[in-house]
Image (cartoon, rainbow, N blue to C red):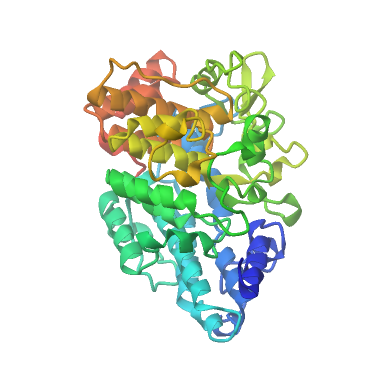
């Protein structure tokens, strides 16, 4: 039972969570960069002001998110182009990365970072002026802002292999980021992990119950899970497991303990509801970028994907074939709940288009973009478990989940996941199995391949594929061959050979940081 003061902030957070209400999406807040209208001293007067500023930091991602989806799909094996494609989009598909290509612009992510810095520098002003602003609220806000900033830096390093790290007290964007000396991906990750730990943003391991009661902010990246992703990139699997699992156990009080557990909330036909008014699907979604054509917030990606619009990109045949090859537990010969009519559809026989951002056909330009959600994090957790010697548990999360295992065989430490259905079982797909004769590293790599194949379907066109391939390739004996063969599969024979050779050079895994 939470106190009345906590009830008040949770009501505020509920407003912020759905974005379409006044705190997050009003013309006065979501459309305007933080601090632009009035000075910080004038602005930070109340708890409501602080929450408004908190959510204002996300506004820059409305411009960034569509480009992230396109960059990932065109560079990986998930998207092909149509004859309508413009030269900039065609260049990405052909693995050509010119400095003047607008899709390679990273400044939008840095603007979000700058906005985060500005709020962090000033948010304490409101704490001292509003008696409803409790110290733990400030902790929670700071933690979510750290999580958003770390997510931005991690995204930059996944794209470019390096990043310029801006001083935390810098609240305006440097004139020429490209002239500053970037840090390597590994060094950026180490810095972010150190920053989380040194600033005590994450609760101690013995206070998980308190973490569940915190004022976690719906709509932000789950900062504990972001830390887990940082450790996964470092190949520190034990810490990756701990923080990914903790992130999935830490739900906002307005959602309840069932949140983020991949239970029956979005099973079978309900799976597509994850993306229908995604900001409201708080049992699954964490970082959601909302759009509303009525508020002049347009998802520009839709124009490029729909056949009655510009129609420049489409799903690759590799992805379609993978989903069509699935078999359900009822013996349906396709991925019924995630495939045709949901992730993609047809104009005519064999002529596909991307459907995922047109589930709400009445308002396609208002389709939200989900950048972090439970299905994604469960598969990252399975990846870490598999590499940490817990392959059987990894297969549980991939297949039938914890609820599908007898009580005597359930793994220790996962009691919060008692209703977990598993990624494949949630959409009634048959289990993936590895023969008992396959052991050792061969078994680990086979399971890892199955996890990545599943994630390519589960998170299709969500901007995950390229970073997944790069992360896994770095563990393999022939990394260039591994990643090159997968991406090359979507091209015709002449281009396929070029792509295989292109990715043999590790420098080509990343975009140029101009």
Q: In this view, does 225 lie to the left or right of 425?
A: left
Residue 142 vs residue 473, the one in the foreground: 142
Q: Can residue 476 be seen in this view?
A: yes
Q: Residue at x 60, y 76 (%)?
A: 47
Q: Position of residue 78 (x, y in %)?
A: 49, 28
Q: Where is residue 321 in the image (x, y as percent from the top left)?
A: 52, 17
Q: Residue at x 56, y 74 (%)?
A: 35
Q: Position of residue 59 (x, y in %)?
A: 58, 59
Q: Is residue 91 visible?
A: no
Q: In this view, does 358 lie above or below 441?
A: below
Q: How many marks?
A: 0
Residue 425 vs residue 103, the one in the foreground: 425
Residue 472 vs residue 447, the one in the foreground: 447
Q: In this view, does 209 lie to the left or right of 229?
A: right
Q: In this view, does 387 lie above or below 496?
A: below
Q: Which residue lies furthest to the left in this view?
A: 477
């Amino acid at each position: 039972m939470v106190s009345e003061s906590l009830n008040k902030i949770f009501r505020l957070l509920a407003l912020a969570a759905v974005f379409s209400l006044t705190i997050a999406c009003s013309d006065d807040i979501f459309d305007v960069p933080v601090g632009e209208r009035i000075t910080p001293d004038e602005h930070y007067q109340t708890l409501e002001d602080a929450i408004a500023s908190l959510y204002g930091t996300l506004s820059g991602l409305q411009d960034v998110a569509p480009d992230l989806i396109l960059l990932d799909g065109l560079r990986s094996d998930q998207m092909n182009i149509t004859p309508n494609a413009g030269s900039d989009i065609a260049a990405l598909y052909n693995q050509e990365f010119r400095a003047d290509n607008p899709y390679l612009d990273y400044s939008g992510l840095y603007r979000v970072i700058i906005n985060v810095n500005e709020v962090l520098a000033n948010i304490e002003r409101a704490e001292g002026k509003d008696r409803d602003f409790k110290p733990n609220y400030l902790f929670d806000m700071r933690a979510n802002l750290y999580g958003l900033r770390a997510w931005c830096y991690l995204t930059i390093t996944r794209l470019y292999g390096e990043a310029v790290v801006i001083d935390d007290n810098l609240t305006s964007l440097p004139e020429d980021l490209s002239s500053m000396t970037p840090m390597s991906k590994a060094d950026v990750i180490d810095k972010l992990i150190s920053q989380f730990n040194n600033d005590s943003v994450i609760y101690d391991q013995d206070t998980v119950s308190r973490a569940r009661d915190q004022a976690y902010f719906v709509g932000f990246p789950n900062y504990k899970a972001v830390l887990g992703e940082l450790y996964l990139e470092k190949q520190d699997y034990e810490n990756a497991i701990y923080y990914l699992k903790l992130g999935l156990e830490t739900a906002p009080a307005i959602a309840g303990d069932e949140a983020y557990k991949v239970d029956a909330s979005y099973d079978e036909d309900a799976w597509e509801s994850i993306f229908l008014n995604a900001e409201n699907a708080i049992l699954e979604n964490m970082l959601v970028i909302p759009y509303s054509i009525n508020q002049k917030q347009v998802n520009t990606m839709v124009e490029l994907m729909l056949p009655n619009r510009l129609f420049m990109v489409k799903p690759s045949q590799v992805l379609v074939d993978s989903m069509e090859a699935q078999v359900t537990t009822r013996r349906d010969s396709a991925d019924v709940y995630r495939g045709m009519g949901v992730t993609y559809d047809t104009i005519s026989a064999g002529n596909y288009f991307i459907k995922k951002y047109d589930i709400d056909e009445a308002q396609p330009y208002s389709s939200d973009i989900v950048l972090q959600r439970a299905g994604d994090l469960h598969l990252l957790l399975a990846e870490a478990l598999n590499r940490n010697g817990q392959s059987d548990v990894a297969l549980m999360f991939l297949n039938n989940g914890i609820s599908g295992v007898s009580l005597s065989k359930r793994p220790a430490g996962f009691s919060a996941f008692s209703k977990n259905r598993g990624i494949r079982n949630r959409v009634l797909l048959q289990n993936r199995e590895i023969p008992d004769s396959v052991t050792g590293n061969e078994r680990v790599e086979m399971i890892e391949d199955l996890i990545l194949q599943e994630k390519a379907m589960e998170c299709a066109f969500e901007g995950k594929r390229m970073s997944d391939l790069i992360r896994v390739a770095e563990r393999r004996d022939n990394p260039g061959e591994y990643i090159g063969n997968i991406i090359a599969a979507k091209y015709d024979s002449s281009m396929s050979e070029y792509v295989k050779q292109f990715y043999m050079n590790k420098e080509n895994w990343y975009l140029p940081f101009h």
